[in-house]
């Protein structure tokens, strides 16, 4: 095989991978719309869990005080599995439209739930500008040894999510 053909094959593989990743994030964005209006004042977030380039579970933010998107996706996956999900999750990639929360409010911190699940790779479209989070979720995941990528489909996700961000009210 000539060097040009080999380079072309590598570039095709990279483009295919990026295109697949974009499709998974855009699916997470599509299902995030289902969260409205019940999730408010929380933002409408979507999450898909993927292994072997196949979606195995998805979730979106529920009404206030109930599960966030990541927890819903983890629950959807675990309900389909008869064994513990922890060992099976190391090959799963979580695609999340907004940075997983790092704080405990009305619900547990999603970053901790991802760690406990055994997922080792998370792709996030955008950071959460909420001062209670704002990079802290990413930091918690990385400190736990999870590979985190930020920015996939940022423009599309930001265009949808921006009107809903920074609307949550503090707990009393």
Image (tube, helix red, strand yellow):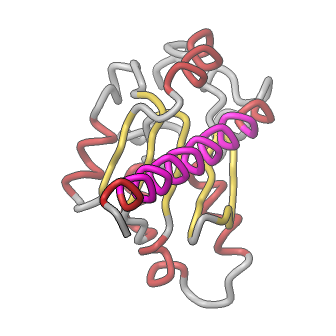
Residue closer to the observer: 74 or 38: 74
Image quarter for residue 53? bottom right
Residue closer to the observer: 146 or 103: 146
**Residue 138 location (% of width, % of height):** 31, 41
Residue closer to the observer: 162 or 53: 53
Q: Dividing the image into 4 quarters, which one contains the N terminus? A: bottom left
Residue extending furthest toward the bottom = 83
Taking 82 as reference, is 137 above or below it? above
Residue extending furthest toward the front = 2
**Residue 144 location (% of width, % of height):** 24, 60
**Residue 4 location (% of width, % of height):** 36, 53
Residue at 54% across / 48% down in the picture?
21
Q: Image check: 117 left or right of 47? A: left
Residue extending furthest toward the top = 163
Q: Main secondary structure of the magenta part?
A: helix
Taking 150 as reference, is 172 above or below it? above
Image quarter for residue 84? bottom right
* Magenta stretch: includes residue 24: yes
**Residue 75 location (% of width, % of height):** 65, 64
Residue at 63% across / 52% down in the picture?
48
* Magenta stretch: includes residue 151: no
Taking 24 as reference, is 26 above or below it? above
Residue at 66% across / 37% down in the picture?
26
Q: Image check: 16 left or right of 5? A: right
Residue at 69% across / 55% down in the picture?
58
Count of all numbered marks drawn on residues in the image: 0
Q: Which residues are magenta?
A: 7-31
Residue closer to the observer: 8 or 78: 8
Image quarter for residue 76? bottom right
């Amino acid at each position: 095989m000539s060097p040009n053909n080999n380079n072309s094959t590598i570039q095709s593989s990279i483009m295919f991978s990026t295109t697949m990743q974009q499709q998974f994030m855009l699916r997470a964005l599509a299902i995030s719309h289902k969260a409205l209006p019940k999730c408010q004042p929380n933002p409408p977030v979507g999450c898909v869990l993927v292994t072997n380039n196949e979606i195995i579970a998805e979730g979106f933010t529920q009404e206030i005080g109930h599960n966030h998107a990541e927890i819903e996706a983890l629950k959807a996956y675990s309900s389909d599995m008869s064994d513990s999900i922890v060992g099976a999750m190391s090959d799963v990639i979580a695609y999340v439209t907004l940075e997983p929360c790092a704080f405990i409010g009305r619900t547990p911190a999603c970053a901790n739930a991802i760690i406990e699940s055994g997922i080792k790779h998370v792709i996030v479209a955008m950071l959460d500008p909420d001062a209670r989070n704002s990079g802290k979720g990413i930091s918690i995941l990385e400190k736990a040894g999870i590979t985190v990528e930020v920015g996939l489909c940022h423009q599309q996700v930001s265009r949808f999510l921006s009107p809903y961000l920074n609307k949550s009210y503090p707990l009393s």
